[in-house]
Amino acid sequence: MTGSSAIQADAIPAIAIGGLRFRWRPDRPWVLDIPTFTLAGSERLFLAGPSGSGKSTLLALIAGIHRATEGQIAVLGADLTALSGSARDRFRADRLGVIFQMFNLLPYLSVLENVTLPCRFSAARRARAIAIAGSVSAEARRLLAHLGLDDPGLEGRAAAELSVGQQQRVAAARALIGRPALIVADEPTSALDADRRLDFVQLLRGECESAGAALLFVGHDRSLASHFDRVVELPALNAAPSVG
Amino acid sequence: MAILTLAGKSLWNRRLTSALVVFAIALSVILLLGVERLRTQARASFANTLSGADLIVGARGGPINLLLYSVFRIGDPTNNVNWTSYRTLAAHPQVAWTVPLSLGDSHRGFRVLGTSRAYFEHYRHGRNQPLRLAEGREFEGVFDAVLGAAVADRLGYRLDESIVIAHGAGEVSFALHDDKPFRVVGILARTGTPVDQTVHVSLEGIEAIHADWRGGAPVPGLRLSAEQVRQLDLTPKTITAFLVGLKSKTAIFRMQREINEFAAEPLLAILPGLTLQQLWDLMGLAENALLIVSGLVVLVGLTVMLAALLTGLNERRREMAILRAVGARPGQIFALVLGESLALALAGAALGVLLLQGALLLAGPMLQARLGLAIAGWPPSSHELILLAAVLGCGFLAGLFPAWRAYRYSVADGMTIRI
Ligand SMILES: Nc1ncnc2c1ncn2[C@@H]1O[C@H](COP(=O)(O)OP(=O)(O)OP(=O)(O)O)[C@@H](O)[C@H]1O
Ligand SMILES: [Mg+2]
């Protein structure tokens, strides 16, 4: 499928990195030294690498939580190195969906409130969610149903009462609400057993595809790699000496 | 706005801890405001009782003691004033009026005051208000009694009731003047002062019940009936103290000196307002100590809050990471935690004010009846509002610390979930 919209989306890469270097403190060694890396606008990429190789650190840079020490990093066309801290927070709220390994949900909010949480912080995502489904909660219900959580009793339940697999799917719905153009997921499947892993990856991938979002998926389990457009080993990208 | 609703839900999620924190703050606020209110109301109440006299004269002794027993019916006189001295001073050209006071007897725990009818004319309470009879009339006969409002209320007395006066001031007395009962002829309107707790009789009445007594005990073998007593000369030999009103205020200090140098016997004249001020100066130390203690209790309450928020913070680090991931700025994390402290302090202060109000509503009539203290309820005085603002200010300051910690966590952790 090579419609004009896909080409247009591809024209602006989701992530474009050039000469990126990052260290936690000036007296520490470089953690990341990435001469060049690009993620296309609707690409689904699997990023692998041993523990401690800097995968989560790279995601934090892409999400604008931390700032690159040197070099360029552009996300969805925005040069993050040129943005202030609060502008990067705003950018993340508007354009990015984030999924963690576990503990993705606020325990004091219901399932529905957890899914709609990004719309409290971003008017843009709120507006997009309303444009798609008529209301924020309708969009949340639509996403939950797509992810196999259409039991009507579920949305009012406290997040803490869900199984781990259910929690991860709720987290995926939250990342997807308001159509962010880039989803970053940091080992979202490592707390799931093998069957559920595959289910989850297929669901997430499918949702990203139908939303036209790029996906940067960090994982250990290379058996999942076949479900992605491309597989990248971080050590192959990263010129910084591995400290393990 | 998003942050405020989140703060509310997060507090509700930890509602048991939150409730305990609110309760601790409420208790400390009750103590703080209660002490403050008791202090100011006691002062106002005492000031209202000052009787409108220019001078109070008694036997030489402590000025505060004289003020306390003559006006507030607290404590006992040490010595008496001779009737002749009283008559001499009452006839002084500067003196406009005098009210003699004779204390020492009681009726079921209420003090009995022997006085003259000048008392009803010249005694002033509150903002210069005269005494008013709610029922009946002033005393005329030797065995007539006029009751304070609280006496009539508490003991359920009506006009024409016959009452027996006891020797001494105790609630239970075994030395009763039961052979010479008094008749209630009048009941005074409520004044909110110790007048309400007083049984008023004439000086002659006091003299009459002691006619067959010497040195605080009945004379053995001597029993005079009420009828026999009426025939005696009932001019008192001594009184306890007397109030003096002067023709001109400018003469107060001269008159005071003159009385203090009175040749016939050692007397003491005091200016009620000035002596009350001395009393407050004396009490000031204790009051301040009490205020400091209640202030410290507020600090304890806020420390409880601080402890609860800080303990919660560590396990909430992942909550911060989630909020950061959906786009919360570190400043919003700061606002979230600060908002929680403020909400707790505010709820605690509000609950404290409400509970105090309720307690005063319940205990008010009791305080009024037993201590003559009228503790007004609503609204809180401006001074109390300042204290409340100080509590909230301290809550805000205390909240800055966990908020700053959360801010630091959220900057350092970023999106990393720390467990
Ligand atoms: N907040 C931090 N401060 C200082 N150093 C850090 C911080 N977070 C991570 N590091 C260091 O940065 C390096 C990369 O860590 P990172 O978390 O990115 O690894 P990772 O590839 O995600 O590993 P894993 O697969 O175990 O999650 C490690 O050496 C780690 O010790
Ligand atoms: Mg990691």
Image (cartoon, rainbow, N blue to C red):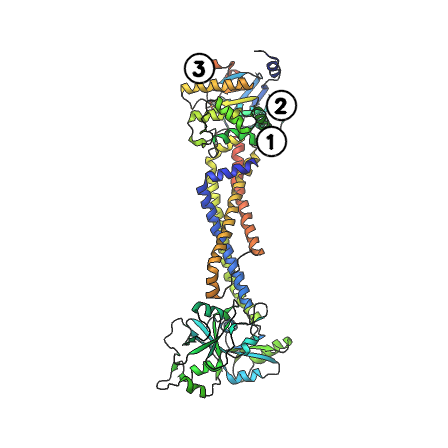
- Image position, residue B144 (x, y; %): 47, 79
Number of marks drawn: 3
Q: Which numbered circle lies on residue A86?
A: 1
Within-10-Å neighbours for mark 2: few <14, some 14–19, many 20+? some
Residue B7 versus residue B370 in the image, above or below: above
Residue at 47% x, 19% y is A201
- Image position, residue B342 (x, y; %): 53, 44
| Mark 3, secondary structure of its residue | helix
**Nearer the N terminus, badge 3 or badge 1?**
1
Task: Answer yes or no: is residue A238 visible.
Answer: no
Q: Are marks 2 and 1 on the same chain?
A: yes
Q: For mark 2, what is the residue?
A: A79
Residue closer to the observer: B409 or A148: A148
Residue B110 versus residue A49 in the image, above or below: below
- Image position, residue B114 (x, y; %): 48, 78
Mark 1 belongs to chain? A
Mark 2 belongs to chain? A
Within-10-Å neighbours for mark 3: few <14, some 14–19, many 20+? few
Residue B370 versus residue B121 in the image, above or below: above
| Mark 1, secondary structure of its residue | helix
Cα distance between the residues tagged 2 and 3: 34 Å
Q: Looking at the picture, which amino acid does disc 1 mark?
A: Ser
Q: Looking at the picture, which amino acid does disc 2 mark?
A: Asp
Displayed quadrant of residue B154? bottom left
Q: For mark 3, what is the residue?
A: A223
